Amino acid sequence: MNVETLAKILHEAGREAVLKNKVVKKDGAPLGQIKFLEWNELTVDAQEGRRIQARYILDQCLVFSYQETYGMNKQKIQELGLENMSLTIPGAWYKQ
């Protein structure tokens, strides 16, 4: 998975948190009044902030998309050198 894809996924994860009212409210504003910005509406700095988060995750873990991991068998796991890493969530192996 590349940085840009993961950065956009992290941004969408933020949307989920907002929709579930699980975020810190800025200036006490009710969440219903907060507009969640689309990726292309973010400032360059905000987009880069998501990329920094993505790079950190990619540096700490080997992350594969669901499509990449679906049906990954033991031989493929060994080929990728993942057998000695911890599978933290489907598709993410933590580099120990």
Image (spheres, rainbow, N blue to C red):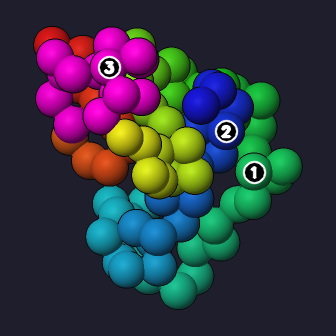
- Split into 4 quadrants, where in the image is the N terminus? top right
Residue designated by label 1 = 39
- For numbered disc 3, what is the local secondary structure? helix
Residue at x 42% of width, y 28% of height: 76
What mark, if any, has residue 87 been given in the picture? none
Q: Amino acid at mark 2?
A: Thr
Residue at 16% over, 17% down: 84
Residue, x 42% and y 43% (percent of image)?
72
Q: Is residue 37 magenta?
A: no
Q: Are marks 2 and 1 in contact (CB under 8 Å)?
A: no
Left or right: 44 as drawn, with respect to 96: right
Q: Nearer the viewer, mark 3 or mark 1?
A: 3
Q: Is residue 30 left or right of residue 35?
A: left
Q: Which residue is mark 3?
A: 78
Q: Contact (CB < 8 A) between labels 3 and 1? A: no
Q: Secondary structure at mark 2?
A: helix
| Label 2 sits on residue | 5
Q: Earlier in the sequence, mark 2 or mark 3?
A: 2
* Labels 3 and 1: the sequence-earlier one: 1
Q: Earlier in the sequence, mark 2 or mark 1?
A: 2
Type of residue at label 3?
Gln
Magenta segment range? 74-87
Q: Please give left or right for residue 58 compared with residue 44 in the image.
A: left
Toward which corner of the image does residue 8 lie, by quadrant? top right
- Residue nearer the viewer, 71 or 87: 71
Name the image quarter holding the C terminus.
top left
Residue 86 within the magenta-colored segment of the rendering: yes
- Please report the residue visible at 76 percent of the width from the left and 37 percent of the height from the top: 43
Task: Please say if 28 is above or below 55.
Answer: below
In this view, the residue in front, 53 or 65, is 65
